[in-house]
Image (spheres, coloured by chain):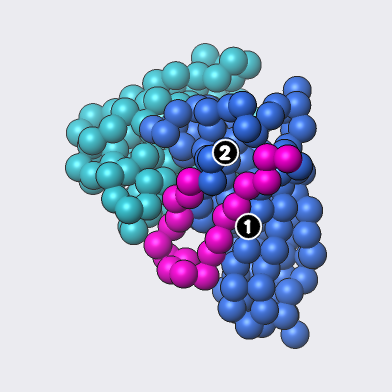
Chain colours: A blue, B cyan
Amino acid sequence: QLQLQVSGPGMVKPSETLSLTCIVSGDSISSSNYYWGWIRQPPGKGLEWIGSVFYSGSTYYNPSFKSRVTISVDTSKNQFSLKLTSVTAADTAVYYCARPQGGRGRMGAYDYWGQGTLVTVSS
Amino acid sequence: QSALTQPASVSGSPGQSITISCTGTSSDIGYYDYVSWFQQHPGKAPKLMIYDVTNRPSGVSDRFSGSKSGNTASLTISGLQAEDEADYYCSSYTTSNSPVVFGGGTKLTVL
């Protein structure tokens, strides 16, 4: 059974970098045809797509994050990561990692989700 | 990148049917048959209910169905049950430089 687990600090200071990792078990990132994704949800608000990464390292990002976001993959550890720089209070959210159905067109059809982790940006 | 447009809330009585709309543009819903719907209960991760406009993942009740006309996709829930009360989100693949877009979400209340 595929499982995704988000790990990383629950609090980040303003202007610093938010770093999260999604540890995948039950499937091999390097042998699959999926665009592994990061999605966030500010408290009381809707879902916001952050970006996706293919096992090859190819990435797609939400331009709303401009140059602040980097998503990378480590196939040797079967995990992928999110880095968001220069965070502000507006980046406070529950961050989810997820795996979609499959194929580029289904990039947003996430059928497996991590548990989500609340990251609070505060000094 | 503009979010897809959903009504903020809908409501219905047990046993009734409701429909939630998701309006996009000719660059997303109107262009691709890659619309998904998610159900989210408070404090839980979203759950995929519909993908590719009309397909249900294994284990999802057939009371949930999806459709699309032009730039608008719809999720219909028939035979409303108390446990259907949740937030619902649509998503679509897009032609823009940001390939995934979500709707703003709809809160379903079962009266």
Residue A47 x, y percent position in the rendering: 53, 52
Q: Can residue A44 be spotted in the picture?
A: no
Position of A66 relative to A14 (above/below): above
Q: Is residue A59 magenta?
A: yes
Say which of B107 and A61 sits in front.
Answer: A61
User: In the rendered structure, which segment of residues is drawn in magenta?
Assistant: A58-76
Q: CA distance from mark 2 to mark 1?
A: 14 Å
Packing grade of label 2 (10 A; few <14, some 14-19, many >=20) is many
Quarter of the picture holding the N terminus of chain A: top right
Say which of A30 and B34 sits in front.
Answer: A30
Type of amino acid at the residue the image marks with label 1: Leu
Q: Earlier in the sequence, mark 2 or mark 1?
A: 2
Quarter of the picture holding the C terminus of chain A: bottom right
Type of amino acid at the residue the image marks with label 2: Tyr
Residue B69 x, y percent position in the rendering: 23, 30
Residue A29 x, y percent position in the rendering: 64, 34
Q: Is residue B54 magenta?
A: no
Q: Is residue B13 left or right of residue B23?
A: right
Report the label total: 2
Q: Residue at x 59, y 15 (%)?
A: B58
Position of A9 relative to A15 (above/below): above
Q: Is residue B70 left or right of residue A109?
A: left
Q: Residue at x 28, y 32 (%)?
A: B32
Q: Residue at x 68, y 29 (%)?
A: A28
Position of A65 relative to A71 (above/below): below
Q: Which residue is mark 1?
A: A82
Q: Secondary structure at mark 1?
A: strand
Q: Is residue B90 left or right of residue A79?
A: left
Q: Which residue is mark 2?
A: A55
Residue A52 x, y percent position in the rendering: 52, 47
The chain holding disc 1 is A
